[in-house]
Image (cartoon, rainbow, N blue to C red):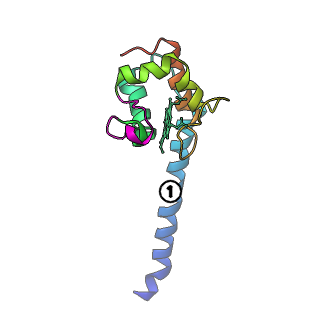
């Protein structure tokens, strides 16, 4: 077994570096690098709700709204804060709005641009 030690070390290094690489690629795609961020014809159901679910529902789902005092789950709830400017205000960390997510990093530029595009098209229930 001992004489295979260097081999195992190599396998481990390869595993770690390949994981790091794919994370980097995912991040680049997410950031919209290389033109990978599609912001046209955004759909509430397939593009916008999943971003909210992943980043906001911990405090803003119907079940968790007691944490924040406001539910953003479902189109009609989200549309209220989309149409009065609060949604874009909080995710872009604009002055006068509480920066969101309240805990954790700002949304990626790609996700912010997707939400902006959806709001600019009238926050449709599509
Ligand atoms: C860790 C909990 C938490 C997370 C995650 C979170 N929020 Fe909040 N959010 C709060 C709390 C608490 C408040 C109310 C406190 C305040 O207004 O400062 C709030 C308030 C808001 C408001 C109302 C602001 C206003 O001025 O009336 C909006 C809109 C909002 N959040 C959007 C979001 C969005 C969009 C996300 C995800 C990108 C998000 N939040 C993620 C805790 C959270």
Q: Residue at x 54, y 47 (%)?
A: 104
- SS assignment for the magenta stretch, majority: loop
Query: Looking at the rendering, in which quadrant would you find the N terminus?
Result: bottom left
Outermost residue, right direction? 95
Return the x and y of residue 93 as percentages of the image width and height: 63, 33
> Taking 16 as reference, is 73 left or right?
left
Asked if residue 58 lies in the magenta stretch, the reply is no
Q: Residue at x 43, y 19 (%)?
A: 79
- Looking at the image, is 64 positioned above or below residue 70? below
Query: Looking at the rendering, in which quadrant would you find the C terminus?
Result: top left
| Location of residue 124 (image quadrant) | top left
Return the x and y of residue 108 as percentages of the image width and height: 56, 36
Outermost residue, left direction? 63
- Mark 1 — residue? 18
Query: In the depicted view, which residue is nearer to us: 63 or 28?
Result: 63
Label 1 within 8 A of ligand 1 by Cβ? no
Where are the magenta residues, as a range?
62-73
Outermost residue, top direction? 122
Query: In the depicted view, which residue is nearer to us: 18 or 28?
Result: 28
Q: Is residue 55 visible?
A: yes
Outermost residue, bottom direction? 2
Asked if residue 69 lies in the magenta stretch, the reply is yes
Asked which secondary structure carries label 1, the reply is helix
| Location of residue 61 (image quadrant) | top left
Mark 1 crowd level (few <14, some 14–19, many ≥20, 10 Å Cα): few
Q: Residue at x 47, y 76 (%)?
A: 7
- Looking at the image, is 4 positioned above or below residue 54? below
Q: Is residue 36 visible?
A: no
């Amino acid at each position: 077994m001992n004489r295979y030690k260097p081999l195992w070390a190599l396998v481990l290094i390869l595993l770690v570096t390949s994981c790091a690489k794919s994370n980097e690629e995912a991040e680049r795609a997410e950031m919209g690098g290389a033109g990978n961020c599609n912001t046209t014809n955004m759909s509430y159901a397939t593009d916008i709700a999943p971003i909210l679910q992943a980043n906001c529902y911990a405090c803003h789902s119907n079940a968790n709204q007691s944490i924040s005092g406001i539910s953003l789950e479902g189109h009609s709830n989200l549309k209220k804060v989309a149409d009065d400017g609060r949604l874009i205000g909080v995710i872009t960390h604009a002055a006068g709005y509480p920066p969101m997510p309240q805990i954790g990093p700002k949304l990626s530029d790609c996700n912010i641009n997707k939400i902006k595009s959806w709001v600019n098209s009238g926050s449709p229930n599509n």
